[in-house]
Image (spheres, helix red, strand yellow):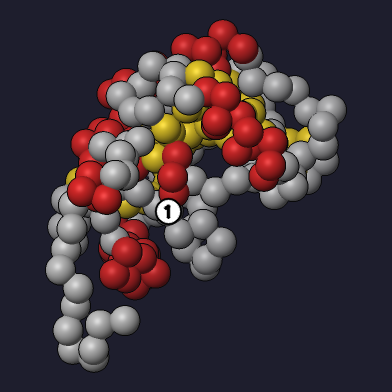
Amino acid sequence: MAPLGRFPKRVHVSARGIRLITEPKAYEAMHVFPNVYKLVEEDTARMRIFPLHEEIELARVKTEFSRFMVKDYVKSVKGTSFPKYFDSSIKQDAFNQWMEVFYQYRGDLLTGGICIKEYLDLKKYGDRTNEYRVFYMNHEIAAVSRNSGQLSTAALPPETLVEKYRNLPSVFYTVDFAELENGTWKIIEAGDGSVSGLSDGQDYGAFFRALYQCL
């Protein structure tokens, strides 16, 4: 271990015989949602982006969305006191106050800018939505897993839709699909495979064997 206050010399990973599966540009392409949005736009919620810490003109937003959710370029603040969506009843001053709460929740993790996304009504089976996470490796489908704790009897995403996104600009990435109340399916998220979590109850051994087979 290096003495306190000193750091070992940086060595490029290739000098250690390591080859990155995901290049930095590919990581950013999938990790930052506005980058991938244009590639999945026809199968995902509509979205508009705004600079950080600038007032979002609510009147403009309301002309496009009757209900909308807020996230930064990477994450929302789901599971907090922040509203899961806003509708046309929200006033500018109240929305501005909520945005300050959003910035506090994201803190040092705040990334890029603000995404205003159309809010979608997801179908429920009991008290669970029907969401699936698909891992793609080397442009093959490595794993399709239930990602919202739903029962195994819940409908699967259409095979044609899952196959459609095998060739996004990365070797290792995820796409999350969800069933809507009307029975259609939408992409609700995408991400880099190395920082996307496995679903609860997913078989880790089977997952890594699948990655190996895809490579």
Labels in figure, total: 1
Q: Indicate the quadrant where residue 8 lies.
A: bottom left
Residue 207, x across and y down, in percent: 63, 37
Q: Which residue is mark 1?
A: 76
Q: Residue at x 60, y 38 (%)?
A: 208
Quadrant position of residue 40: top left
Q: Is 178 left or right of 191, judged from the image as shown? A: right
What residue appears at the point 51 percent right and 57 percent down from the top-left corner? 78
Nearer-the-camera pick, 129 or 98: 129
Residue 103 vs 215, above or below: the answer is: below
Q: Residue at x 45, y 39 (%)?
A: 193
| Residue 88 pos. (x, y %) | 41, 44
Q: Position of residue 171 (x, y in %)?
A: 38, 28
Q: Nearer the viewer, residue 89 or 195?
A: 195
Image quadrant in which the N terminus is located: bottom left
Residue furthest top in the image? 160
Would residue 89 be seen by someone viewing this image from the given angle? no
